Amino acid sequence: MPPVAENDLFIRTASGGRDGLRADFPIFSRTFGGSDSSPPRPLIYLDSAASSQKPAVVIEALAEHLRSHNANVHRGVYGLAQEADAAYDGARRRVASFVGGEPRTTIFTKNATEAINLVAYAWGRANVGAGDAVLITQMEHHANIVPWQVLCRERGATLRYLEVDEHGELSLEQLDAELAHGDVKLLALAHVSNVLGTINPVAEMAARARAAGVVTLVDGAQAVPQMPVDVAALGADFYTWTGHKALGPTGIGVLHGRRELLEQMEPFLTGGDMISSVDFQSASWNELPYKFEAGTPPIAEAVGLGAAVEYLDRLGMERVRAHEQALTTYMLERLAEVPGLRVVGPPTADRRGGLASFTLAGIHPHDVAELVDRGGVCIRAGHHCAQPLMRCLGVGATARASVGVYNDQSDIDALIDALQTGREVFGL
Ligand SMILES: Cc1ncc(COP(=O)(O)O)c(C=O)c1O
């Protein structure tokens, strides 16, 4: 197996290797455990699909904002408040341009879950009624299932699912057949699956939906951190993602929406900041994007996310994708060496994002995660907030290893060693 050569982000710095790009992330200077008989272990983090680690520039941007520029936004005339306004609005411009969006149609929420709920409430309640259908897929995260279940139950609509085939892929023929029923109002699907890793052909699917008069929402929570995304080019009506998986802080998510739809929609949450004026009995709404940002927004978090996307921009998202794809190829090859291990999802890394979910014969996924933790490797085990998909796969849970910009081949090697040791512990 050749090393993850030209595209390796680690060649960016003179020091290279483990100390290269990883040195930008202070958490990797931490160690765990350690005793008289065993040295402390470094952090081997293979759980970026759950949440990414943060570079120093993000931590510092957050701290610097709180230290020197902190004030509420959109209400103060004094200089410090204007600095806070500039920081928040500047972060929105940076975040919007990172994914080809417009600031006016880029709305900050608490996370991706809230962004999807915003659409389910503000667009869904006005546009989905009895006899209509919402079409999602079997590979969705609960964040992109439950809001539609609640909407459909409330409105007397039907929730239907596009199936996942044995390679973890969706079928465009099934999409066409579903659209041909004429009752679908909304198609909602993941750009990249958090379990299978599948990269869905969302531009093509959104185009087919649009031709059938169907609105599309794409859940980009796993896509934005790891590949170039251009929301305008993708053509979906709504695109959602979350800051903490994209090297940014927790507490901030993003919704990009088609302007005409956002303008027609009623607010999701109401209160301060989202109004233009309030009388005793009624109120009128602020302009976009503020109409959808009730109350004090996540100001410092937006500043942190702005620093995160600037950092990713400097790396270059093409290189990030190339790095993670090469590592995933390596991971798939090495996982194939472990007897009894079955990876779910597309067989090759060109069709998947930077993760591999797997089962190991004879060991429950939770035990797998615990065993590899003894070797200092952090992976996730469970249903990954995708219980319907687990049912389709015929498993209760999987273990999942996912990579980020700071991982290299040595992390995958450590995972494989830990898995092999775990098999020995279980007498396999
Ligand atoms: C595909 C996908 N969608 C949505 C979410 C929800 O993100 P958040 O919890 O930040 O709202 C996740 C998080 O794991 C995810 O993987």
Image (cartoon, helix red, strand yellow):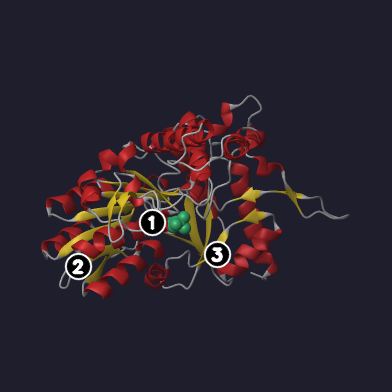
Please provide percent x and percent y for residue 29.
71, 42
Tag 3–tag 1 contact (CB < 8 Å): no
**The C terminus sits in image quarter:** bottom right
Q: Where residue 133 is drawn, which disc sits there? A: 2
Lower position in the chain sequence, tag 3 or tag 2: 2
Please provide percent x and percent y for residue 41.
74, 50
Residue positioned 65% across, 37% down in the render: 18
Q: Which of marks 3 and 2 is in front?
A: 2
Front position in the image: 66 or 417: 66
The quadrant in which residue 387 appears is bottom left
Marks 3 and 1, Cα distance to the nearest angstrom? 40 Å
Dot 3 beta carbon under 8 Å from ligand 1? no
Residue positioned 58% across, 72% down in the render: 362
Marks 1 and 2, Cα distance to the nearest angstrom? 32 Å
User: Looking at the image, can residue 338 be seen?
Assistant: yes
Lower position in the chain sequence, tag 3 or tag 1: 1
Q: Which of marks 3 and 1 is in front?
A: 1
Please provide percent x and percent y for residue 279.
30, 55
Q: In this view, does 127 lie above or below 32?
A: below
Disc 3 target residue: 381
Callout 1: SS = loop
Q: Nearer the viewer, mark 1 or mark 2?
A: 1
Please provide percent x and percent y for residue 371.
66, 64
Disc 1 target residue: 271
